Image (cartoon, grey):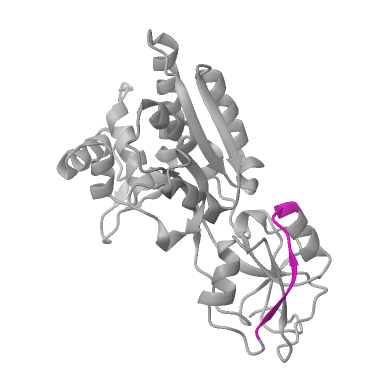
Amino acid sequence: MPFVMTKMEIGALQALCAIQDQGGVSRAAASLALSQSAVSHKIKRMEDVLGCALLDRRTGRPRFTQEGEKLLGYARRILALHDEALHALSTEPLSGRIRLGVTEDMTSSGVSRVLGRFTRLYPAISAQISVAQSRVIAARLDRGELDAGVFQVFADDRRPDDVTLFEDSLSWVKSPELTLDMDQPMPLLTFDDDCFYRDWALHRAPQSQAGFRIVMQCASIAGMTSAIRAGLGVTLLNGRHIEPGFDVVTDLFPPPPNVASIVRTGPKPRNATLMALIRIVAGEADWHADKGPGAAADLVKVRDGRGKPAA
């Protein structure tokens, strides 16, 4: 039987990525200025071409099949190259200024590489980057002091227009050398007063029996992981920063909500310059790699202050 080459439409790949970024078909349609039926038709036609299902439609919110997850990685790379080719051949290069807020942990991951690529692709765009805590970036965006931000929120606090880069778990973490005495206030490590992890632990979560006492504040992720290793206290940490040998405490504290790393824009309408930045940031393959807890760390889950492994 002769081999028949199939073709995938750019518009269908854009729709596929938008469904993941926006959290559903209807939101994806709104972000693409299309009807919901048009987006569904694009996905169905691509499924017919490929001969496999990309979305599991049995639940209220569409979830990607294994084949759909695999195609997403290729789709983002294809769309990034597509945009790069359009830019290289464009007779009207983008220009202007972008005021961008990013968190410290994002500058040490894929976002620095992405911003370097963006400035090389669009040398006429001036990018002014501010590094701050997530809650500070969100507030500055709402006041119109930033054009875009790359930061974290609790997964349930995402807004309809946010572009999700990835979701991650949040866990209580400590050193195996630290024994927790539930009759005494828990030694707590926090990033700083603007940290929304800290706000949840102290004000929104059910309190442990004796409460917490803050023993250190540090805005740096490197300083925080060093304090954990030294056994100074317990803290909330997302899965990407849990190191081999850290204990994940599962039974002593209330389970934290998941977090999401997002791109959010300010109150002004998104122009071509902002859209170019969002496409390049969202297209970074590193966001979609499996780097949650357990993927790269040898974790010991404990259930009591004596450090006994969980069943």
Q: Is residue 286 left or right of residue 235?
A: left
Residue at (75% x, 52% y) in the render: 222
**The C terminus: image quadrant:** bottom right
Q: Is residue 261 visible?
A: no
Q: Is residue 304 magenta?
A: no
Residue at (80% x, 76% y) in the render: 178
Residue at (32% x, 36% y) in the render: 269
Residue at (45% x, 12% y) in the render: 88
| Residue 274 figure quarter | top left
Q: Nearer the viewer, residue 134 or 112?
A: 134
Question: How many numbered marks appear?
Answer: 0
| Magenta span of residues | 211-222
| Residue 9 figure quarter | top left
Q: Nearer the viewer, residue 255 or 121?
A: 121
Q: Is residue 212 magenta?
A: yes
**The N terminus: image quadrant:** top left
**Residue 122 placed where, x, y %?**
50, 19
**Residue 273 placed where, x, y %?**
41, 26
**Residue 98 placed where, x, y %?**
48, 31
Q: Is residue 142 above or below residue 51?
A: below
Q: Is residue 265 left or right of residue 285?
A: left
Residue extending farthest to the bottom is 183
Q: Nearer the viewer, residue 31 or 290?
A: 31
Q: Is residue 212 visible?
A: yes
